[in-house]
């Protein structure tokens, strides 16, 4: 086998792994859009907020300490504890549920029946609110996130592929963990939506709000539940991306990576988010590998959006999205 | 009622009078947004130095200093708005800490007669004072940085880079592309092979670039990054086990927050710098006594001694010394932006002065002239010690390759002069 072909396999595998990370972000969008028809612009910022909260909770940081110190002239910064990762994740999940309740109670409850564009605008407002709130609560410095996930080259894959191809493949341990977590998350979400009462209620709301109301489903509860699930998915995405780069403002920009995934996979399909993520991940990495050197590189973002655009032209609902036909 | 209002208005104008006499050094900062981690320490250092001068010396030449802060969010449009909203306050010099804002401000400051100081960023060819009358980028620019990086590689390779390979990982923007021409010229001169690896904004995903580095195994990697790109690149380098001592970032890729997310894996990473690092200088005792202990430290007061804090401090010190020079030149304490420009053009920084200021060996000695607004172009190399959690300067400040850089500066600035219809000065 030629070297280029072997390198291509390595690029393909890394593209799959990158795709899983994109899909993790896209999943949060899908959950909320499917249940409420809201395109949640703030999903990326929710990932940032969740990750910053996780670091703050684990380190025992006093929330709003800068504000408290500025107003009261105190010098408090830490409670003095250091929590293990799993406890931090559980406490952060509680915070994300509180956030979901807040969002539903103070924003979307007042916007029932409004046009989708109004709801979308509300999520833009929410994104900016959360950005500032996160900075105020936990500070804007870059934070190291360590919940004990392994990072760096997987030596078993490196040695095994070296034995087969004479070249050891690079696969990041963190990407392998992300793949396993994403798979578990999707399985859990599918089981939840198919086999639990709340999950079936969520699907009913997604199909028809009015019909769901008429059979006694509590819409407010379902929407709080959906935003909580999206918040949990944001937490998982925040952990994976935050472990790679540290927790910082740019984490909110990972939403940009999810958009082409959604356009390709469809806004209403959980499997679509996964398949879309894998196609975008593999496609952009292979394009960069094959075509990048001929055109000066940095083609990944461009390719992802162009591929999504092509899909939009030929299949506007995406690969797995629902085709909506409105009769006049 | 009307008389009372008129009296109050007159009183307000009179009360505002002394404020106009302050020396105004606006801070176009960014404490929010994707680049806040870099913007905050710089802004804190800039503000704290002027607070120190006010508290310890009563200002500059007896005139208090005022530092109005305007948040740009590293956004070019907001930066221009900040400039427009503060220039009427008698602003003496602008330091926007953004190449994008700098490019927009160059024609504006030239027309308004207000100097612009872009230390280690901005338009590199602004070093040619014959063309850029109001823009200064001393003591070093991007091209000096690239050359200093290569000079360091020459030093550790007994002066011979032939047969070696160097990869440039750069932010795919005007800033990131700045060193390409210089590195290409230097590769012809020294015989190393150069490969270019652009990273798209913001740089959160760099797998392709680092897989390529792993395959091609360049001997050295030079990085021109900013923001999240730096942290991800250093982590990816650690992941592929690229030797950190062969990985060198420009001064915008060499702060504490760039290396700490990677933990121990970042140990040995190097960065180019044009000023010293750490807080082991007498001036920090003064800052503690006159600024921190009085509760006047800027921001949260938790950035003191960090790399970018020191850069802000250094920028403020150079601005203050230029203001002092202007006061002496024009024999007045209340200087105007035009006088400040003259002071910047006549600035002379000696080691004696640095020692007197409590900053011995904090930066190189240099002087500015009408022709040379770029200073000496000296740079040093710092290295990260992960266990100690600190940077240290591991070389002296060394020369950059003027033989290569000067013709590039001349060609670029003269092309600008022709395009913008600028008349050459300094004859």
Image (cartoon, grey):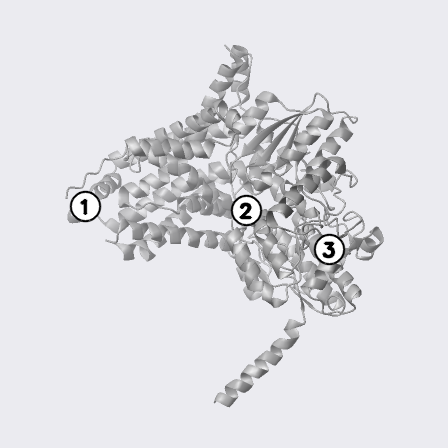
| Nearer to us: label 2 or label 1 | 1
Q: Which mark is residue B318?
A: 3
Q: How many numbered marks have been drawn onto this rendered protein structure?
A: 3
Dot 2 corresponds to which residue?
A: A59
* Residue pictured at 34% horizontal, 53% vertical: A122
Q: Chain of mark 2?
A: A
Q: Earlier in the sequence, mark 2 or mark 1?
A: 2
Dot 1 corresponds to which residue?
A: A212
On screen, residue B112 above or below A327: below
- Viewer-proximal residue, A198 or B135? B135
Indicate the secondary structure of the residue bearing disc 1.
Answer: helix
Can residue B261 be spotted in the picture? no
* Residue pictured at 49% horizontal, 20% vertical: A10
Q: Report whether A290 appears left or right of B350.
A: left
Measured Cα–Cα span from mark 1 to mark 3: 68 Å
Q: Residue furthest right?
A: B352
- Viewer-proximal residue, A195 or B196? B196
Q: Report whether B311 appears left or right of A236.
A: right
| Nearer to us: label 3 or label 2 | 3
């Amino acid at each position: 086998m030629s070297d280029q072909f072997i390198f291509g396999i390595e690029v393909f595998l890394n593209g799959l792994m990158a795709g899983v990370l994109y899909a993790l972000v896209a999943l949060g969008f899908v959950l909320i859009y499917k249940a409420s028809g809201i395109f949640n612009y703030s999903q990326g910022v929710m990932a940032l907020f969740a990750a910053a909260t996780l670091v703050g909770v684990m380190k025992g940081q006093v929330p709003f300490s800068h504000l408290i110190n500025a107003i009261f002239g105190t010098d408090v910064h830490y409670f003095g504890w250091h929590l293990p990762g799993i406890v931090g994740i559980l406490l952060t999940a509680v915070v994300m549920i509180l956030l979901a309740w807040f969002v539903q109670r103070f924003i979307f409850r007042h916007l029932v029946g409004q046009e989708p564009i109004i709801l979308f605008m509300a999520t833009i407002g929410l994104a900016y609110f959360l950005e500032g709130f996160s900075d105020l609560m936990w500070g804007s410095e870059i934070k190291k996130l360590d919940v004990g996930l392994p990072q760096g080259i997987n030596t078993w894959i490196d040695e095994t592929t070296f034995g087969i191809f004479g070249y050891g493949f690079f696969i990041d341990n963190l990407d392998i963990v992300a793949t396993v977590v994403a798979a578990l998350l999707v399985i859990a979400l599918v089981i939840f939506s198919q086999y639990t009462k709340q999950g079936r209620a969520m699907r009913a709301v997604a199909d028809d709000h009015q019909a769901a109301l008429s059979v006694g489903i509590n819409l407010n509860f379902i929407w709080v539940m959906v935003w909580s699930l999206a918040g949990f998915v944001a937490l998982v995405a925040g952990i994976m991306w935050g472990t790679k780069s540290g927790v910082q403002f740019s984490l909110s920009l990972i939403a940009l990576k999810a958009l082409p995934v959604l356009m390709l996979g469809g806004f209403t399909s959980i499997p679509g988010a996964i398949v879309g993520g894998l196609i975008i991940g593999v496609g952009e990495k292979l394009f960069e590998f094959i075509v990048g050197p001929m055109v000066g590189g940095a083609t990944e973002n461009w390719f992802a959006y162009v591929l999504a655009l092509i899909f939009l032209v030929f299949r506007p609902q995406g690969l797995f999205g629902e085709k909506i036909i409105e009769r006049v | 009622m009307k008389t009372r209002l008129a009296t109050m208005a007159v009183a307000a104008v009179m009360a505002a009078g002394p404020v106009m006499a302050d020396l105004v050094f606006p801070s176009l900062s960014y404490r929010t947004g994707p680049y806040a981690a870099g913007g905050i320490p710089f802004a804190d250092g800039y503000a704290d130095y002027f607070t120190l001068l006010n508290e310890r010396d009563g200002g500059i030449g007896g005139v208090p200093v005022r530092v109005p802060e305007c948040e740009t969010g590293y956004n070019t449009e907001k930066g221009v708005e900040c400039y427009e909203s503060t220039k009427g306050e008698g602003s003496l010099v602008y330091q926007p800490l953004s190449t994008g804002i700098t490019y927009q401000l160059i024609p504006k400051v030239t027309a308004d007669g207000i100097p612009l100081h872009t230390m280690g960023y901005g338009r590199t060819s602004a070093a040619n004072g014959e063309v850029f009358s109001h823009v200064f980028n001393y003591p070093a620019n991007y091209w000096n940085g690239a050359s200093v990086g290569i000079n360091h590689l020459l030093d550790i390779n007994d002066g011979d880079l032939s047969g070696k390979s160097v990869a440039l990982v750069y932010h795919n923007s005007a800033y990131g592309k700045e060193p390409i021409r210089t590195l290409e010229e230097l590769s012809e001169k020294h015989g190393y092979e150069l490969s270019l690896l652009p990273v798209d904004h913001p740089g959160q995903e760099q797998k392709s670039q680092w897989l390529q580095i792993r395959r091609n195994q360049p001997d050295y990697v030079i990085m021109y990054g900013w923001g999240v790109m730096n942290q991800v690149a250093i982590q990816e380098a650690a992941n592929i086990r690229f030797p950190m001592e062969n990985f060198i970032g420009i001064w915008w890729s060499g702060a504490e927050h760039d290396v700490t997310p990677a933990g121990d894996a970042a140990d040995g990473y190097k960065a180019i710098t044009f000023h010293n690092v750490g807080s082991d200088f007498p001036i920090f005792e003064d800052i503690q006594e006159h600024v921190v202990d009085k509760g006047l430290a800027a921001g949260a007061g938790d950035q003191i001694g960090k790399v970018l804090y020191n850069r802000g401090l250094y920028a403020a010190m150079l601005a203050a010394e230029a203001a002092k020079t202007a006061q002496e030149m024009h024999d007045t304490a209340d200087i105007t932006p035009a006088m400040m420009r003259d002071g910047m053009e006549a600035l002379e920084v000696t080691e004696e002065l640095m020692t007197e200021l409590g900053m011995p060996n904090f930066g190189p000695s240099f002087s500015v002239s009408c022709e040379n607004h770029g200073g000496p172009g000296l740079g040093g190399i710092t290295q990260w010690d992960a266990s100690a959690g600190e940077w240290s300067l591991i070389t002296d400040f060394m020369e950059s390759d003027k033989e290569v850089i000067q013709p590039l500066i001349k060609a670029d600035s003269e092309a600008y002069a022709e395009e913008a219809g600028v008349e050459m000065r300094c004859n």
